[in-house]
Each structure stands twice: as structure tokens, then as C-alpha cells.
Amino acid sequence: MLRYHIVLLTVKVCERLANYRKTVFGLRRSEQTSRAGVLPGPFWRLCFASIVFLAMQLVCLPAFSQPPQPGNYSEAKYEVAAELNRDAPMRDGIALKIDIFRPKQDGKFPAVLLQTPYNKSGQVARAKKFAARGYVVVNVDSRGRFESGGEWDPFSAKHKTDGYDLVQWVAKQPWCNGNVGTYGLSYMGWASWWTASQAPPALKAIVPEVAPPDHFYNCPYQNGIFVCWMMDWAGAMSARLPHSAGPGAYGGFAVNREKAYSNLPYIDFDKTRNYKPNAWWKKWIKQNTAQGEYWKGISYQTPQSYAKITVPSLAISGWFDGNFPGTPMNYLGMKKHGGSPAARRPRIVIGPWQHIINKHRVAAGVDFGPQAIIDWDGYVLRWFDYHLKGIENGVLDDPPVHVFVMGRNKWRAATDWPLPQTVFTKFYLHSKETLSTQSPGKEQPDRYVYHPEKPTPSAPFGNAHIDGPQDISKSASRDDVLVYETAILKEDVEIVGPITSQIFAATSCKDTDWMIRLSDVHPDGKALFLGEGVMRARHRDPDNAGRFNPNKLSRIEPDQPYEYRIDFWRPTGNVFARGHRIRIEISSSYYPYYLRNPNTDADNIGLATKFQTAKQTIFHDTVRASHVVLPLIPVDKKTSTAGSF
């Protein structure tokens, strides 16, 4: 934190000196260039001194910081009044049902809006907490859910306009001061972004929590591959009221996934899994690229959509969040394309959590220590205090990026994402299952066979998403998995941030999937699963170095080597301790987390009715040097305190 404030202080000093120069010497931009040789010396000496001071402090200060600090935020001093099941009118004449929780006192207060398909009645505790601190919280049942009017379609473009209409309706109520914010987890995080993309004038700030990205970067398609938990979700959410298949997660739809998702074609899951009849399920399958009108209507991550968003954002996710990619993607998108200076200064927090953030310090049997739990609601309140109440509390002076480093079990505060000190380093695949920073020579490729009927089993997961750093050493011993790992590490290696890969591969079929996993191998042999990247082969873009293209499919010729640039949708923040190894695995299935690619030449996997065995080849030689790029953080050996987790 201190490191960040030194950076901020130095920038402010230089800005003030620059303003001083303009004021005292009256130089316009054109004159600054033409008269550069005669600019007064004191200005440059002061700037230089500031920069030297900054550099010295960056070297001397410790690398780690405190967790995001809530500081001082509004006290709980109001009794709370509730108004339940009121109507909020939408532009097309239907009414959404809302619950209002507000201070039991006359006056106008800022409002916080939450839109949920999961029953507004389940969102009461947080609403009352915020209302007691001087906010009016409005919980809304999404269009077509529970008692709200309209037809339920989870990705109807009407959710965007509903968000706009709700914000403006709330702002005009006699108890609102005209300032509105939004918050909410998962689908509700989606709703925050959808609403912000419509630029309602009364919206002043958003807190999208574990918000997914657009639908081909995570769910229902993870880089072109179906994720099974979204199929569960479709069943449980297939009607106005929750639909149950029996006891268990996702209304029982998450039970016995291996058997349940073995049937072809996937488009018939509504019958084989007994969904309630609806008009949208088959759209998910039939519109199998992002160019489908259905998906284009609800998309929010285009430069044009980001440019419409003018409000500041505070987002949060976890290293084991199944919706992780939305948070860093939105940070980068808003920083580049945001529609105002405030919008172009986004903030993110990434902790050691699963999808339900900040609830437990232990995941998959690993204890991440006391710093794993933070006062998140306090931090959100402080954020809204500034943006909705106008309280000068210094929240904008906080670092914009906070990330938790596992293994060290401490937080890093940073000025940007990726972290500015990151050294992106290539780790090359080699023969004899090795991984190193040395580029390969003349080496023979590695091969395996992918049988869709006998897929590589995925790590166990109890609900929708990843349960934490699961041990995946058992699956690594299979014949359909290639393993590459470093020598035993002689010192700690810290990896924090985006991970990319460049893989040269061939398949005997006209389509397949490529999956890459990162794990931390302990001295006792267990391999803790930390991150992954996947791609359906036909989504490679031949005009963009083989990167994922959600908008179209390319041709894959059997046994022809192709380049694939696969970004890890779930990277990591982890210290690989001395004595451990860094491991990379490659396979073509990881079932049931991902539904299987049948390896046929069908454009639409969801319509395929048969499987085909694929013979896979991974190249790592002088010309086709397959590798992963890991974000290494220079380790301060004096302060290194990594432990095995």
C-alpha cells in the first residue's frame, strides 16, 4: 500500500510541477516543443529528484501489502423499513416485482440496485445491512422470474433495457437523491454490466462481483467448448420458478453428471435431462458462434459497449471462480475503451476463493490463512460512500489492483493488471516430459489418442465450479494426457497474472479440443490444479496466429500441424516453493467439466450424433516450439516466506 502511495505522490508532484510550469512560464504545447532547450532548470531538477526518490523507494519497500482496507465507512444508524412486492414499470408495459429496503426516516438517500433471477427474497440480509447505513436497496426479480412480468429468457436483450428503466425509475422516487449504484454476484454481476452498457444517467457506480464475460469466453461456451455446469443451470432455471431434478446442487441437475451428459445430441438435453419447455434452450445450441443474433443482443464486451459505460467499476473474483475471466477482461476493456476518465480507472480484487467469494479461508483442504477473509461489504460501502454520497474518504487513493498470492498467503497491491513488475517468461515443452526456459532443438513430437467414449476425468467439483486446488495427479498418469514439468525448483518461483500458450498440434480428425492445465507438484507427488486454458480447434483464427475467434469457425485438415494461441481463462497467483515442480498437462478432454468434442466435421457440435477417435500430436522442435508464457514476479529473497500448501 505504501509503495502505491509513493507512486501516486510522485505522479501528483510531477502534475503540480507541470501546472506550475504552465502557469508561471505560460507555455502552450507548441511552445513547449519549440522552446525545449530553454525551459527553466528548476522544473526538470524537481521532476528528476521525484523520479529518483520513487525508484529508491520501490527498491527498498517490501513487496507485499495489506488486504483491501475498508477504512471508515457509513455507520449503521438507521432503522430499516421494508416495502415488499411493489411494481416497477418497464418501457414495454410489463412490471417487475421489487422489494425496497430503506432508512426509516424522512429524506432522500442514494440507492443500490440488485437484479436477480434467484428470488429477491433471498437477498434481504445484505440489503438491510446497507439500508441501515443510509442507502435505499432495491432488490428486483428478473423479467419472467417469480412474480415479475414478461417471459423468462436468461439472455434476452430486454435485460439491458430493464436495467436502464429500473435505474431511472429508482432515481425519480421521493426517497432517492438521484444517485444509483448496482452490485451483485454472478448473474447479478452480468446485470450490472448490462445495465451500465445502456448508460442510464442516474447510474453513478457499479460493483459487479464474479461477473462472467460474454458467452463464448466462459459460459455456456468456454472458448467454444460446452461447460457442463451451465447445462445444469439451464435445467434448474428452465422456467419461471426453480425446477428440480431431485436433491443436490443446481436443483439436482449436478448429480451423476458423467452419465447424464453422455447422451448425444447435446441439443436434446432438454428432453433427456427433463428441462421445462422454453423458447431459448435450442437457441443456445443452434447459434454456436458469437455472430448469432441471440448472443449479439446481450453482448456487453465490445469496444462500442465499453465506450458507452461512463461510471467507475469495482470488481472482484477468485482464483477458483468458474466465472473468473470476466473480471480481468472487463478491467482491461474499461481501461482501454471506457466512456469517461472515471470509467477508465477500473478496480479489481482477486482472492483465493471459489465462485462464492470471501466466505471461507479453506478450499479443497488448503488453508490460505487469516488474510483470505476481508471486510468486502465494508469496502463496497466505502466505494459507494464516495460515489453516491460524495464523502471524501480517500478510496480513489487506494491501489486499483489487489491480488492474493497463494503459497505466500499474502496480498499484493499494484498500479495495474498485469502487475507492472511481471516478467513474462517462456517455458518450452520438451521430450522426456520436461519443461524449461531453454528453447527446443530437433526433438520428436509427442502423441496420444483421445477416445471421446473414455474421456480424461476432470477434477472433482461439488457444485457448479472449481472447489479449490484439487489434486489431479491421478489423471496425469493416463495415456491420453501429456505431462511436462520442470526440474525440482531450487528457489521459490512466484507466478501472478495472465498465462498464455502457443501450441503446435495436429489431429487425425477434422475437429477436436485442446486443453492445457497448470499444477503445482509437491515433493510427495500431489499435483494441485491452479489454472487452465482450452479451445475448440475449429475456433482457431488462421489470420491471427491461431488465437480464439468466437465469431467463426475455420477448417482443420487431418494430420496437418496448426498453431494455436490459447489464453488461460483461469490463470493463477501462486508461489511454487523451493523443492516443488511446475507442471503443464495437455489433453483433449476433461469430462464432465467440459462436454466432449465428438471429433467429427460437424460445424455444430451440439447436433452431432456420433463420436470419432482422434490421434493427437504435439510438436516441440526448432520450428514449432510449443510453450507456455508464465507471468513471473521477481522474488525478494530477503522477504521470501513461501510455504507449501
Image (cartoon, rainbow, N blue to C red):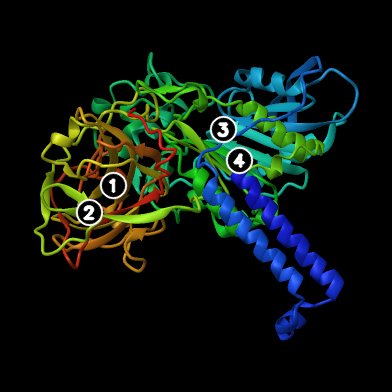
Mark 3 crowd level (few <14, some 14–19, many ≥20, 10 Å Cα): many
Q: Quadrant of the N terminus?
A: top right
User: Which sits earlier in the primary sequence, circle 1 or circle 3?
Assistant: 3
Circle 3: residue type: Pro
Label placed on residue 605:
1
Q: Is residue 489 left or right of residue 622?
A: right
Residue at screen point 70% across, 48% down: 311
Q: Considering the numbered disc 4 on the image, is that residue within a helix, a strand or a loop?
A: loop
Mark 2 crowd level (few <14, some 14–19, many ≥20, 10 Å Cα): many
Q: Nearer the viewer, residue 374 or 553?
A: 374
User: Residue 431: in sight, yes or no?
Assistant: yes
Disc 2: which residue = 511
Disc 3: which residue = 67
Residue at screen point 90% across, 22% down: 106
Q: Disc 4 or disc 2, which is closer to the eye?
A: 4
Mark 4 crowd level (few <14, some 14–19, many ≥20, 10 Å Cα): many
Is the C-beta separation of discs 2 and 3 under 8 Å?
Answer: no
The alpha-carbon separation of the residues under discs 4 and 2 comes to: 49 Å
The correct choice, above or below, for 90 with respect to 298 in the image is above
Disc 4: which residue = 1
Q: Nearer the viewer, residue 293 or 453?
A: 453
Measuring from the top left, give residue 555's x and y in whole percent: 26, 62
Circle 4: residue type: Met
The alpha-carbon separation of the residues under discs 2 and 1 comes to: 10 Å
The alpha-carbon separation of the residues under discs 2 and 3 comes to: 45 Å
User: Which sits earlier in the primary sequence, circle 1 or circle 4?
Assistant: 4
Circle 1: residue type: Ile
Measuring from the top left, give residue 506's x and y in whole percent: 17, 58
The alpha-carbon separation of the residues under discs 1 and 4 comes to: 49 Å
Q: Quadrant of the C terminus?
A: top left
Mark 1 crowd level (few <14, some 14–19, many ≥20, 10 Å Cα): many
Q: Nearer the viewer, residue 179 or 149?
A: 179
